[in-house]
Image (tube, rainbow, N blue to C red):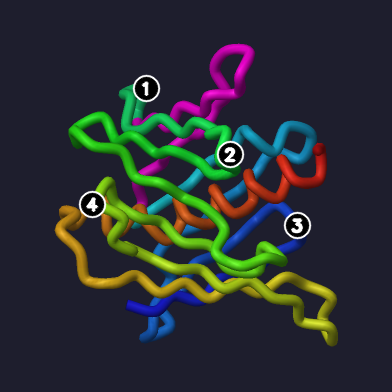
Amino acid sequence: MHYTVITQGHRQFEVYDEAGSLQGTLTQNMWRPTRAEMIVHGTGYQFAPKGFWQTINMTRNDMHVAEIKFTLGGGLKIHFAHLASPYRFRHKSLWHSSYAITDDYGHEIAVVQTGINWKKLKSTYEIDVHPNTLDKEMNALLPLLIMYCVRYMRVLMAAG
């Protein structure tokens, strides 16, 4: 499934599917970009840092959904509360213009290609989600979770 992300400023992102229907929105905090709110089909999710090493907790109605940790290899490890094995998010290209999320066996679940629209001076994002074994809820979350991870990785690169 192919998704297109429309940026509204630098902190709000809208994800549209192939048919052009809105799948959800991601809004990041201006001063603390690790904090964010995601709305997928009317359900709200929150991202908030926990602890010194910036582990990010993703919650829905104050219930733990996933945990995102930075790894020493330069990527992120995403561990969903109801799944046994974690997923990995990392850059695929030298210039950090494409990223992929893989399962524990190294199979690619989704790829995001980033770019810049020079006419509008905005970032562009194209997300392709491959057929996978995730349930319906996780597949709905995936494009917006990928957007959060891309933005988080860019904040880490800018800080380092």
The residue pinned by badge 2 equals 36
Q: Residue at horizontal 45%, vertical 68%?
A: 111
Span of residues in magenta:
42-60
Q: Is residue 50 magenta?
A: yes
- Sequence-wise, the earlier of marks 4 and 1 is 1
Quarter of the picture containing the C terminus is: top right
Above-or-below relation of 66 to 120: above
> As drawn, is 120 to the left or to the right of 29?
right
Residue 6: image location, x then y, percent: 61, 72
* Disc marking residue 137: 4
- Cα distance between the residues tagged 2 and 1: 14 Å
> Predominant secondary structure in magenta?
strand
Q: Kindly state the secondary structure of the residue where label 4 is placed.
A: helix
Q: Kindly state the secondary structure of the residue where label 2 is placed.
A: strand
Type of amino acid at the residue the image marks with label 2: Ala
Circle 4 or circle 1, nearest the eye: 4
Mark 2, residues whose alpha carbon is within 10 Å: few (<14), some, or many (≥20)? many
Q: Are marks 1 and 3 in contact (CB under 8 Å)?
A: no
The residue pinned by badge 3 equals 10
- Cα distance between the residues tagged 2 and 4: 19 Å
The residue pinned by badge 1 equals 62
- Sequence-wise, the earlier of marks 2 and 4 is 2
Camera-side residue: 16 or 89?
89
